[in-house]
Image (cartoon, grey):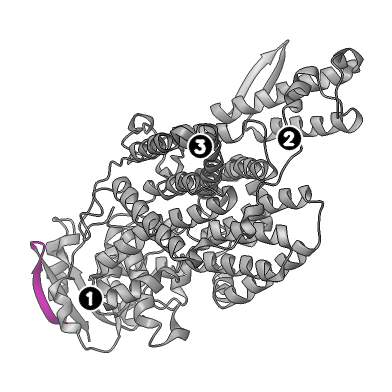
Amino acid sequence: MAVPEDSAQTLPRWVVVADVLVAIFFLIGSIALVTDGLSFHIAGLRVSARSATRPYAWALGLALLRFYFERRPLPLIARVLRRQPPLLFDDERLLAAPSMRTWRGVRELLVVTVAFSALVAVATWPMVAEPYAVSDMGDPLFSIWRLMWITHEFPRNPLNLFNGNQMYPELRTLSFSDPTLAPSLLFAPLHALGLHRIVAYNIVFLSAWVFSGVTMFLFVRALTGRSDAAWVAGAIFAVYPYRVGHLSHLELQMTIWMPIVLWCMHRTMISGRLRDGLATGAAVAAQFYTALYYGAFVMTYAFVVGAVVWLARGRPWAPVRALAAGALLAAVLFSPVAAVYLKTRSHMGNRHPGEVAFYSAVGTDYLKAHDRDLTYHSLSEGAEPERSLFPRLTAVVLVVIALWPPLSVTRIAYALALAFSIEVSLGMNGSIFPWLYQHVPPYGGIRVPARYSMMAGMSLAILAGYGAARCFRRWPQARGALLAVMTAAIAVESLPNITLKYPWREPPPVYGSLVGEPPAVMAEFPMPDEGAWEFAEFAYLYFSTFHWQKLVNGQSGWLPPGYQYNIVKARSFPSDRAVAHLRSLGVKYVTIHGAFYPPEQLPSVLDGAAARTDLELIASTIWRGNESRLYRLR
């Protein structure tokens, strides 16, 4: 619509006032977002904003009301709008046949995979050079146990898969955290080929970075039609800083299927075909099997992107029907696991709001880098590890370039999805997550809303691909130099500051007496004492992968009351009370690991156990400079 140059003179005064108020509310919200709150006085009135959500909501509501009654913009805005041609969708290339059907396409995919592997090696050094090392002695050992348990139990008794050998006599203990079912499909053959469980775990862990980059490459290449821009997007996604902040968490690296979900969703919006809708549902189910967190995240994220595209396309019903069929397929495919989690959820309930609030991001967290980020290490001071969300500069610069007019529907959709992702990551400090927490079941079990920032990272990667494509089209003669500069910038920004730990390649020799014995119940000491020596629980799970006895001990994302009760009752071992409780649980074996006891406490424990006539010593060995003992409870 043409706008006259003198439109400011013909606009009612209330329209100008409304536009000014919209700008003020938006400014207040932006300041509140960056400063984690805003409070000041004007003419004796106190103005405060605890978060950016309410000022942004006022700005949006006032803008909608203003343009409902008067659609003419101010002259400055009119001049900007004249530069914007009619919005294009910029996604028609998604229906093209994949180039992987040709040898050239397969070769390109192999080259890209090798290139991403090299980039990931840089971003995680020295992990590649130390295959028997892990980031710490906590969650990595827990993940090795999960992968090993699935590999061990599924061929023998798949119906018993979720009844892990920990926290006896609790049921469904694998469902107390993400089961990592799909990653086990890669781990199992690697372990079967003879690779040590630590080495196989590291391959699975690092492959998640590589394959996430590959799937993002395929998606953005389909969006933009350019392999160079797709490489930039894939590289940003593969080494996004969120990943190095979560080196302990295998499941939080498993973002492989999310770009595929978006790819299939876009195809459904364009074509309305049932097969594309079913493909979307299958990809969502695959993401749930790969990482539960991201299965829930990608559903809401794809809904936001899809809603924008659907509205822009005139609200067609064919894509809705196809995606509904896909949602039904996803529900059917995931129903066996969902049924187990529904049973567990009835006991677990929602996460405690106070715990969720602690792990909810604030605006300034996006200006803080993780301690493992070498290039931006100066930004890590005072940062909470789970809320170190600085996205690095290369991605931000390319996103600004992508969002400079003229725009397309697709870029607008991902810009809105970026804003949505940041808002959800604010958790209890925002407005969207509290509603999701109350009304959408998967979100009630989410402990760390800040992890939704990975969806912001995906938005940044996609938009950065558009920004890179714009640069390559603008300066085609310098394409090679620009690509080299972007790649070098991403690599330099991803330089890590990682310290590794070295788990035991073999368990303590005292377990040798259990080889070939049928599974029985075992209690391992020391047990956790109000958080002290909690790392030993991770070690016991890891050791159990060598003997598969049932453990009273355990560790997971949720600790059931029964497990905590048993730990409290038994931790005073070898007291009469503790031994009586172990006997009531059906415990047959007891181990004592001197290496895990405080030096001043160990002698009394060893002497007390030796003095009991109801404990039969089976084996005693030296491990890590201390005595380890295995007893049979008579």
Rendered location of residue 87, percent (x, y): 74, 40
Q: Is residue 454 magenta?
A: no
At a point 33% along the width and 76% down the height, the residue shown is: 189
Judge from the rendering whether residue 569 lies leftward or rightward of residue 390; answer left or right.
left
Q: Which numbered disc, 2 or 1, marks the residue closer to the eye? A: 1
* Label 2 or label 1, whichever comes before in sequence order: 2
Label 2 belongs to which residue? 57
Q: Quadrant of residue 489?
A: top left
Q: Main secondary structure of the magenta part?
A: strand
Stretch of the chain drawn in magenta: 612-625
Q: Which numbered disc, 1 or 3, marks the residue closer to the eye? A: 3
Judge from the rendering whether residue 434 lies leftward or rightward of residue 341; answer left or right.
right
Q: Residue furthest top?
A: 43
Rendered location of residue 543, percent (x, y): 24, 71
- Mark 3 crowd level (few <14, some 14–19, many ≥20, 10 Å Cα): many
- Mark 1 crowd level (few <14, some 14–19, many ≥20, 10 Å Cα): few
- Nearest the viewer among 389 and 220 is 220
Looking at the rendered structure, the kind of residue marked 3 is: Phe
- Nearest the viewer among 508 and 20 is 20
Q: Quadrant of residue 268?
A: bottom right
Rendered view: 619 above or below 604:
below
At a point 39% along the width and 72% down the height, the residue shown is: 184
Label 3 belongs to which residue? 472
Q: Which mark is residue 542?
A: none
Looking at the rendered structure, the kind of residue marked 1 is: Gly
Judge from the rendering whether residue 408 lies leftward or rightward of residue 73; answer left or right.
left
- Nearest the viewer among 355 and 442 is 442
Label 1 belongs to which residue? 194
Q: Is residue 611 visible?
A: no
Q: Secondary structure at mark 1?
A: loop
